[in-house]
């Protein structure tokens, strides 16, 4: 709408030769904004053949560098989170393994139960159909480091184990509330024509308490078996069932044997406590019936006095 001569004249008369952007020819392209910024900063402008909306080579390099920096930051953050997670997981307390376990209450003193289960020679009386126990010293409560061999059966499987006493916490007095006995060894299992080897660990835990109603001594006896360091949930179901059945049978044998021995051979401390208990019961019974006791005494005195009078009367008549 404006002649080109006027436009050229207006551009030539601008201040300090700068181009006026208030109007332009229809076919003339406007200067690139990024190029003008580079020129104002003293930088090198874009190439002459750079069209509007396109980026220069330096801009592409900077954009690529920003992308690479962003990717590296993301990767570093992910690696840091992963390292922190695995470190925290490794430092977290692990749940202890739990083997095949069963427990029973035994009406006896802790010392008697501990001596019985920790003496290898007695194992043929209660432990998993034990056939034979042999060793250099099997006639006393085994201590740490002592060894003995045992043959027994679980279901139809014949097992031979060389036991080693790994740990023991002996009840030092009648006030002791907890005791423990731990043995481990390598077991040879005869399965038909083949032999399988397993690592066994037996843990016996004893907790002393008083009977809720009778007030007598009792022991909570817990029997646990760990096989090849596996948790109970990772064991073969059939083998787990057979071991559980054998443990329960062993606990029944221990309970019967120890309680029978307690009845037949009460300890001096047991006799003392029993006599004390009887005296207390007698005192409580007398305290509950003071009137009945006094009436009975009065009746006896009256009968005695009457007998004395009758005897004196008979003597007077005879005289």
Image: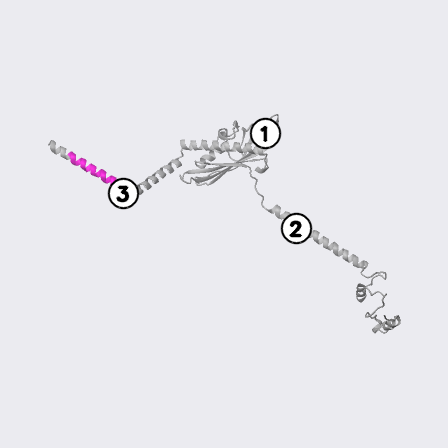
Residue 151 in view, yes or no = no
Residue at 38% from the left image edge and 38% from the top image edge: 273
Residue identifier under label 2: 81
Tell me where residue 36 appears, x and y as whole percent: 81, 65
- Inter-mark Cα distance, 3 to 2: 83 Å
Q: Which residue is label 3 attached to?
A: 291
Label 3 vs label 1, nearer the camera: 3
**x, y percentage for residue 35?**
81, 64
Judging from the image, what secondary structure is the residue with disc 1 in? strand
* 3 and 2 marks in contact (CB < 8 Å): no
Q: How is the image coloured?
A: one colour
Q: Is residue 72 above or below residue 7?
A: above
Disc 1 target residue? 188
Residue 128 painted magenta: no
Query: In the orientation shown, which residue stands out farthest toward the top?
Result: 193
From the image, state whether disc 1 or disc 2 is nearer to you.
2
Q: Residues within 10 Å of mark 3 (few under 14, many from 20)?
A: few
Q: Residue at x 25, y 41 (%)?
A: 295
- Secondary structure at badge 2 equals helix
Q: Nearer the viewer, residue 3 or 223?
A: 3
């Amino acid at each position: 709408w404006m002649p080109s001569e006027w436009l050229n004249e207006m551009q030539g008369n601008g201040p300090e030769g700068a181009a006026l952007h208030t109007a332009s020819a229809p076919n003339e392209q406007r200067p690139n904004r990024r190029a003008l910024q580079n020129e104002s900063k003293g930088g090198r402008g874009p190439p002459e053949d750079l069209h509007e909306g396109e980026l220069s080579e330096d801009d592409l390099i900077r954009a690529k560098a920003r992308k690479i920096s962003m990717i590296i930051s993301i990767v570093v953050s992910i690696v840091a989170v992963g390292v922190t997670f695995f470190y925290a997981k490794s430092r977290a307390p692990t749940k202890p393994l739990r083997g095949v376990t069963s427990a029973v209450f035994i009406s006896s003193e802790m010392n008697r139960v501990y001596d019985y289960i920790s003496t290898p020679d007695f194992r043929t009386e209660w432990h998993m159909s034990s056939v034979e126990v042999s060793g250099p010293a099997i006639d006393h409560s085994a201590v740490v480091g002592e060894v003995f061999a045992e043959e027994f059966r679980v279901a139809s499987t014949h097992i031979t184990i060389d036991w080693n006493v790994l740990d023991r916490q002996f009840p030092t007095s009648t006030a002791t509330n907890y005791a423990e006995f731990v043995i481990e060894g390598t077991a040879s299992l005869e399965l038909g024509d083949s032999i399988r080897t397993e690592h066994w660990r037996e843990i016996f835990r004893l907790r002393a308490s008083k009977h809720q109603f009778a007030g007598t001594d009792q022991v909570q006896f817990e029997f646990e078996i760990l096989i090849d360091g596996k948790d109970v949930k990772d064991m073969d179901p059939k083998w787990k069932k057979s071991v559980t059945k054998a443990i329960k049978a062993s606990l029944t044998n221990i309970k019967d044997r120890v309680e029978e021995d307690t009845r037949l051979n009460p300890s001096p401390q047991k006799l003392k406590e029993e006599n004390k208990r009887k005296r207390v019961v007698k005192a409580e019974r007398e305290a509950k019936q003071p009137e009945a006791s006094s009436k009975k005494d009065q009746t006896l005195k009256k009968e005695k006095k009457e007998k004395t009078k009758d005897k004196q009367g008979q003597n007077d008549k005879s005289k």
